[in-house]
Image (spheres, rainbow, N blue to C red):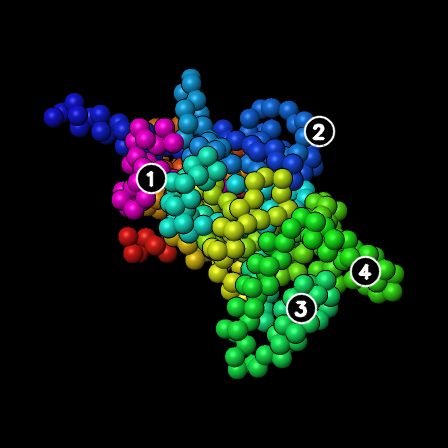
Amino acid sequence: MEPWDKNMKKKRKRSRRPVRLRCSVKNYDWGIVGGHSKVARLFALNSGSDIDPAKPYAEFWIGTHESGPSYADSGSEPVSLKAWIAQDPSVLGDKVVDKWGADLPFLFKVLSVGKALSIQAHPDKELARVLHKLYPNVYRDDNHKPEMALALTEFEALCGFISVKELKDMLSSVPEIAELVGVGNAERILLVNEQHENGKSKTDLESIFSRVMLLSKDTISEMISKLKRRLNLEKKKRQLTVKEQLALRLESQYPADVGAIAAFFLNYVKLNRGEAISLGPNEPHAYISGECIECMATSDNVVRAGLTSKPLDVQTLLSMLKYRQGSPEILQGVPLNPYTTRYLPPFEEFEIDCCNLPQSAAVIFPSVVGPSLFLFTAGKGHFDAGLPEDDMVKEGDDIVEEGEVFFVPANTKIIITAKSTELQLYRVGVNSKIYRDL
């Protein structure tokens, strides 16, 4: 038994050391082009590659998903983070392994949105299993994908359906949609009694939205042409509303696309840096512009219905939506200390910490029972895993700069000190609220 005990001790020591990651990039056509993209800069610094000034850089992926895996820089040959974890799942912590198995339960991204990306929703677990079984080449996994977007810059998005009042206002002010609904139906909706309006409005909303989304391409093209003509005339007489301006922007990016009409049904949100929104399964949304941190359950399942050149699955999207109405909550985060703000979504898989350290300031991230991912987005600092002398502290002690990414095993305390004017970083881990229940 003695040799086995020694090996396990060494394994425990190895499992507490953070490991640098080399991460993946996605060059979708909606990304921000060249060096103007935060994704491009992070990927170039992380990988040691050059930025192509003519190429769009859309997403920087950190995690284990096969569509964009990260690699552990732990030896002479890089190994995928998923394989590295599989060698010693204890790096995830026993409670996380018991709940989610030997894989990271979350996926961490940075997005640079140059033009709108698809009107979409993500399936819940039950539907994800069905879609993956039926169409494994389209829906690559069987997991749900609740997510949160935390703005790095001013960030525009559409998310969730407009309120009952806004639906009525829209039918009064967008004649192209009112004409489709029909005068009689439009008048009935406008006169619905307050007492009954919530349930009835949901039915009306579902009916009208489905009808719009299922229109033929020719009908949509004609509808959008009428809308453009009217708005281009009216903007000479008055200031267009935010939604009207957005409809014209979307049409210019995706001509004759139903998404320009669908936008009238969804809440328009403009986030400032440091504000966030969370999106549950079966909630319609579309990101319009800006840059953000995004975190989600480990999945790449997306059901699309417009504003994209990718395959559409409109019938599935319409059948899965919740048609819940009202403005989304804007999350401001909760301060943990003078430098760190935590964002807690209503999902078990993840939380996000945002940390801004002035020069020479230090912050401690206490050990937690699950794993963490650290991304440094600006500045230079000192990264100390706080290991005791016999746990080879020098290997857990690094100088860090923009573009560096680390996987930090469970039960590892991290101490970070800023060496530049300001050090900016983000940490993602399992939602700390659930540890009390595990």
Amino acid at the residue labelled 2: Pro
Residue 411 in sight: no
Cα gap from disc 1 to disc 4, whole angstroms: 57 Å
Seen from the viewer's position, the closer of residues 229 and 20 is: 229
Query: Which numbered disc, 4 or 3, marks the residue closer to the eye?
Result: 3
Q: Which residue has dot 2 on it?
A: 53
| Residue drawn at the location 78% of the way across and 57% of the way down | 226
Q: Main secondary structure of the magenta part?
A: helix
| Neighbours of disc 2 within 10 Å: few (<14), some (14-19), many (20+) | few
Q: Earlier in the sequence, mark 3 or mark 1?
A: 1
User: Is 202 inside the magenta-drawn segment?
Assistant: no
Taking the image as shown, residue 425 lies to the left or right of residue 306, namely: left
Element at label 4: helix
Q: Along the line of sight, which residue is nearer the eye, 229 or 348?
A: 229
Q: Amino acid at mark 4?
A: Arg
Q: Position of residue 141 (x, y in %)?
A: 41, 39
Visible residue check, residue 222: yes
The nearer-to-camera label among 3 and 2 is 3
What residue span does the magenta drawing correspond to? 82-108
The residue where tag 4 is placed is: 230
Front label number (2 vs 4): 4
For marks 2 and 1, the one nearer the N-term is 2
**Could you tell me which secondary element the residue under label 2 belongs to?**
loop
* Along the line of sight, the residue nearer the viewer: 290 or 240: 240
CA–CA distance between discs 3 and 2?
49 Å
Residue in view at x 22 percent, y 29 percent: 8
What amino acid type should be assigned to the residue bearing mark 3?
A: Gly
Kindly indicate whether the residue at mark 4 contacts the one at mark 2 (C-beta within 8 angstroms): no
Q: Does the magenta run of residues contain 105?
A: yes
**Which numbered disc flags the more N-terminal residue, 2 or 4?**
2
- SS of the residue under disc 1: helix
The reply to whether discs 3 and 2 touch (Cβ–Cβ < 8 Å) is no
